Amino acid sequence: VVIYNPVTDEVVDTKDSKVAAWFLDSDYDGRTFCITQAFFPDKSAWEKLQKALNGKDGPIDAERFEAFSGTTSLPFLKGKHKCVAVKVIDPRGNEVMAVEKLA
């Protein structure tokens, strides 16, 4: 996410390790963003969640935990709209959305 910092009058690039969350709509219709995949790359937040859930439903599956804390989506089928949208949120709550047509 590239954001403008009005205090320093600079455009700052938020690296993928600083992304708080990103979401994929694998069949974006151009109007409504529907989350089909959700990712939380900040592993410190995941560690807190894992500790909170450990006693309730057993330990979190490490393989699944890793899949949803990355910056690469899981495989998905092309939908009827042949369009995907990705929404990225930085730690300050700034968000940006990119839309791509699929061939």
Image: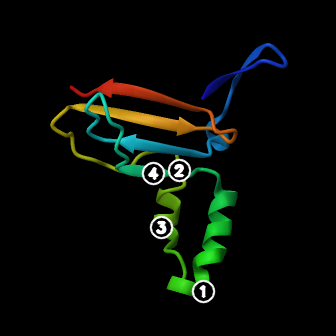
Q: In terms of secondary structure, where does tag 2 sit?
A: loop
Residue 82 percent location from the top left of the image: 21, 31
Front one among 23 and 65: 23
Disc 3 and disc 4: Cα gap in Å?
15 Å
Residues 62 and 81: in front is 81
Does residue 98 appear in this view?
yes
Query: Which residue is disc 4 drawn over?
Result: 38
Q: What residue does disc 2 label?
A: 70
Q: Secondary structure at mark 4?
A: strand
- Give the x, y percent position of residue 48: 68, 67
Q: CA distance from mark 2 to mark 3?
A: 11 Å
**Contact flag, marks 4 and 1 (Cβ < 8 Å):** no
Quadrant of residue 54 in the image? Answer: bottom right
Q: In the rendered view, would you say 15 is above or below 71?
A: above
Looking at the rendered image, the disc whose residue lies closer to the viewer, 3 or 4, is 4
The quarter of the image holding the C terminus is top left
Q: How is the image coloured?
A: rainbow
Q: What kind of residue is marked 4?
A: Ala
Q: Residue at x 45, y 51 (%)?
A: 38
Q: Amino acid at mark 3?
A: Glu
User: Residue pushed farthest left?
Assistant: 80
The residue beneath circle 3 is 63
Q: Earlier in the sequence, mark 3 or mark 4?
A: 4
Q: Earlier in the sequence, mark 1 or mark 3?
A: 1
Sort mark 4 into few (<14), some (14-19) or many (20+) by Cα contacts within 10 Å. some
Give the residue drawn at x 53%, y 37%: 88
Q: Amino acid at mark 2?
A: Gly
Q: Which residue is mark 1?
A: 55
Discs 1, 3 touching: Cβ within 8 Å? no
Q: In this rendering, does residue 58 appear at all? A: no
Task: Name which residue type carries label 1.
Answer: Gly
Residue 91 is tagged as none
